[in-house]
Amino acid sequence: MKQDQKLSREQLKTGCTFGWRLLGSLASSVLLSIPFLVPGTGPVMLVAFLPLLYLERRMTQEERPRFFLYAWLCFSAWNFITTFWVCNATMGGGIFTGFANAFKMALIFQFFHWSKKRLNGVLPYIFLAAMWLAWEKIYFVSPIPWPWLVLGNAFAGSIACVQWYEWTGTLGGSLWVWAFNLGLFGVLVARYGGAWPRFNRKAKAAMVTALPLLLLVPMAVSLVLWNTTKEEGEELEVLISQPNFDPYEKFEFYTQGEQNAVLATQIRENLPAAESSKPGVDSAAVDGGPTAPVLILAPETFTSSLWLDDVRGNSTVYQFASFLKDYPYATLLMGASTYERISSKERPSATARPLREGLWYESHNSALSLNTGASRLDLYHKSRLVPATESTPFPAIMGRFDDEVLGGVMARCIGQPEPSLLYCYAPVEPSDSAASTAVAISESALVSDIPVAPVICYESIFGDYCREFVLLGAKLLCVITNDAWWGDTPGYRQHLDYSRLRAVEMRRDVARSANTGISAIINQRGEIVASTPWWTRAVLKGKVHLNARETFFVRHGDIVGRAATFLFLLLLALWLVRLFPKR
């Protein structure tokens, strides 16, 4: 791709008018949006940047200023078309997120625009792709992360096209998007920009051949993996609850007892109790009974006001620990709003809130697993928190601003520093001499506990974080969420599809419990094998597979992002050196 040449005065007269510039900007925003809104249209992303790249080239040739504004318009439109639903939960946060995210994207294109003055040939375009991929990589670990529109996520609804994510992760899809967009743009510029006659026959053949290969080879590899990937691992029965409480009313109009009653009814109607626990049954006469483990999932923040210094004293924990005596082979994994009391005369941390004089508390969005009698109870605190609605970015600064100016409206949950696992407790097969099945199961030592990943809501977007659960030994991904904050919009469907990407990257089944969204069972190919309707009280019952194999992505992480970051830094250094030449 040769350096852009200035246009003659005659060409400028029929050049890129305001109307055409506006059209080029919005054309890319529409193409970028389609894969996130229409299932099965992921490949559209492979040509989505062409209008904006053409606009940038023409404005460079015509030496027109303010390209940044057109890029910002393009990316603002893309952000709001695809994620407008954020405003349903927080109007200010949705507007800020849309414009701020678009600003960063436009800034990347602006740096690319500037780099063309110092970097020649294809280098500015390689710089653009590397810079974008490095930004996506950094975005996953930034203090205010919003990786919803990572380019590789566009294939979440076209999962059969990207089975090779088990090697590259989602940023492999981002690399594919840039490689094809820039490759096609280079051919079009050469063909219609006057440079084509200067290429020899071999060069022309190479350019024309490379594009179909770049399009078809990844799809062919994915198709092979789609047809050869089989479910691995032993089976585990799961019962997934979708209680369907309106999140805007859940904490104010429903008592915790009413919510517990719904979950208990769903379990009782769909899971057989141990024979020895049924009325009128002589437990001493019972031989055998259900002993295979069953995992029951309840959604994010199912229970509230759980204090960490008295977990077993919590009414919900106590109720279900007693309730599960009828289901000694079952483990309940549910979400909880948890709190930690801290005694201190002064504020112990920027995230602590006052409870009373000399006593403070910190909050968590947690998941817990328990069995009959709560003889085993494990906790996990969500680490990847939603900015503003769950956590306060830069709490030492923003926390004070929130207290003094906003009145303390920003949430201040804190997560645990590293991921940890929860377990589905596997009971021992009772011996013939056991007095009863229930007693044998409850009193025997538990063995072969099944490690599962407690992925809470927003965390399911972070592939590189979810792989850490698998490195710890997780054989199943359990996603618990509450997706109705956004209403009946594309938001909850996109969120569901991102769990499919995690299934492919990790080759793990996903059991997903959504309070009001779509609960689902997803297999290791990312295929939804069973799901519930939207905004319906429902129970999903089925089997998942427990895979212990580690994919290349799990073992080695996001190689694409790391390599792109290294390349970006090299090209940035080259640009800076040429920006300040020696005199």
Image (cartoon, rainbow, N blue to C red):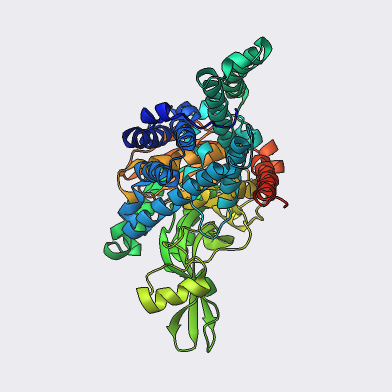
Is residue 258 shown left or right of residue 541? left
Q: Nearer the viewer, residue 103 or 177?
A: 103
Give the image location of residue 96, x and y in percent.
39, 57
Give the image location of residue 370, x and y in percent.
54, 58
For the point 47% across and 46% down, the residue is 106
Q: Is residue 51 above or below residue 581?
A: above
Q: Is residue 255 above or below residue 111?
A: below
Q: Nearer the viewer, residue 179 or 196?
A: 196
For the point 52% across and 83% down, the residue is 347
* Number of marks in the rendered image: 0
Q: Is residue 74 above or below residue 213?
A: below
Q: Is residue 451 visible?
A: no
Q: Is residue 492 above or below residue 24?
A: below
Is residue 516 shown left or right of residue 348? left
Give the image location of residue 313, x and y in percent.
48, 71
Q: Nearer the viewer, residue 447 or 187?
A: 187
Q: Nearer the viewer, residue 537 or 1?
A: 1
For the point 46% across and 29% down, the residue is 8
Give the image location of residue 91, x and y in percent.
32, 57
Q: Residue furthest top?
A: 201
- The picture quadrant where one finds residue 202 is top right
Q: Residue furthest left?
A: 253
Q: Is residue 208 visible?
A: yes
The quarter of the image holding the N terminus is: top right
